[in-house]
Amino acid sequence: MNLNERCKPFADYVVQAKACGFYPYFRPISQSWGTEVLVDGRRLVMIGSNDYLGLAHDPRVLEAAAGALTRWGAGPGGSRFLCGNMTVHEALEERLADFVGMRKAIVHTTGFTTNVGAIGCLLGREDLILCDRENHSSIFEGCRASGARVVPFKHNDAADAGRKLRRALDREFRGCVLLITEGVFSMSGDAVELPEFLELKRQFPSLLVYLDDAHGLGVMGPRGRGTAARFEATDRVDFIMGTFSKALASVGGFIASDDDAVLEYLRHHSKPLIFSAALPASAVAAVQASLDVLESEPERVDRLRTITERVKNGFRDIGLRVSDSETPIVPIHIGSEMTAYHFSQDLFRHGVFALPAVYPAVPRGGAVIRTAYMSTHEARHIDFVLEVIEKLARKHGVAGTAPRPEESLDEAAALAMAVC
């Protein structure tokens, strides 16, 4: 089978989905105001963005990015390892470490490459990784890159992680054991039961805990300092990873730790860090300015929580299933992938931008419409969104009932339309 023959069935499913009018992804946004976007000449309310604090359009953030663009240019000219390292990178690393309560941090070009680079270079074939089944794809790619033995455990279930760890260890095991979980899970909006996982360190003193807080940074904890701070447990977490493409209104990622030697090793062995161009100075400056705003206006975090609580109460009134999580990610549970596609298209037609998440982004048969909220959403936005969702929930039969079972859908078709 040649390459075209291998790829063509997948491509045909995408073409078919577009022809049938329910392909929802890669919509071209021609202009954005943050809480609203322009698509095909229509202005829609955006409830699918990760710009949780609404800082991507803040004048102070834009001004900082423009100033750095003038001083350092549009691109870094190389990797940080060779010729792209700048003083702004190092200043941001110091600030991030302080912000999350760690000694040092290392900045990468994206959150994805942070996970792939860190996990991939710190663990090896003699090691063991315990991994939540619903962790982000970048974490699993990092696990594969490491060559370590990967043991998945039930989502957010520390007891299952403990059972798996006991079975995996034997007297001959001499490697490292790393438990990886997200602080806030990107599709479900679940917050990790962190204290329960940290209790495992009492039973297994050599266990290391790696917290991917991409969706928790700027959202969770006092003044948005993250999930570990939320539980006053920073000193018991070994690694905190975060990204800038959510609450910090930019792009990039970092990993922080109190272990100087490990981070020095990582700085010289993370392949994505060494072999990728450095983060542009304008993106770094945007992160710094976002941190400035967050620290001077912590009420943004409080407002975000107020908005999220209002949405959740509205969903409950409609009859939708809502978790008790305090995160700004509030999925609409659908079940059927086809229903999720049609629901999303109806949202778009009614002026709301929110996309479906299907397998493998969520468990098979557990399709959702992923909605997420910003501290800059106004009451009129939320009023409008709730009105539209109530109407469509009745139309598609997802209010007041369990999610519909999954229809028979070819796996290739599901993959063709899956959120990665």
Image (cartoon, rainbow, N blue to C red):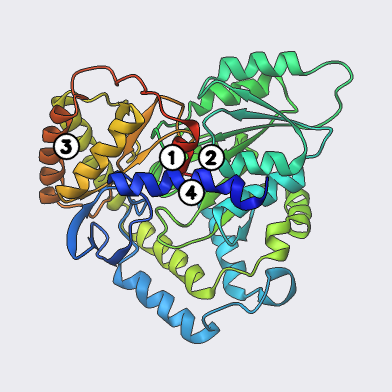
Label 3: how many Cα within 10 Å (few below 14, some 14–19, many 20+): many
Q: Nearer the viewer, mark 3 or mark 1?
A: 3
The residue lying at 17 percent from left, 49 percent from top is 349
Q: Is residue 305 above or below residue 207?
A: below
Q: Nearer the viewer, mark 3 or mark 4?
A: 4
Q: Which residue is mark 4?
A: 11
* Residue 170 in picture, x, y percent from top left: 83, 16
Q: Which residue is mark 3?
A: 389
Q: Evaluate whether residue 34 shows in this view.
A: yes
Q: CA distance from mark 1 to mark 4?
A: 27 Å
Q: Nearer the viewer, mark 3 or mark 2?
A: 3
Q: Secondary structure at mark 1?
A: loop
Query: Contact (CB < 8 A) between labels 2 and 4?
Result: no
Answer with left or right where residue 368 lies relative to residue 40.
right
Label 1: how many Cα within 10 Å (few below 14, some 14–19, many 20+): many
Q: Quadrant of residue 187?
A: top left
* Residue 155 in picture, x, y percent from top left: 51, 24
Label 2: how many Cα within 10 Å (few below 14, some 14–19, many 20+): many
Farthest-out residue, bottom: 70
Q: Which residue is mark 1?
A: 186
**As rendered, which of 195 and 38 lies closer to the eye?**
38
Query: Contact (CB < 8 A) between labels 1 and 2?
Result: yes
The residue lying at 61 percent from left, 75 percent from top is 87
Label 4: how many Cα within 10 Å (few below 14, some 14–19, many 20+): some
Q: Quadrant of residue 80?
A: bottom right
Q: CA distance from mark 1 to mark 2?
A: 8 Å
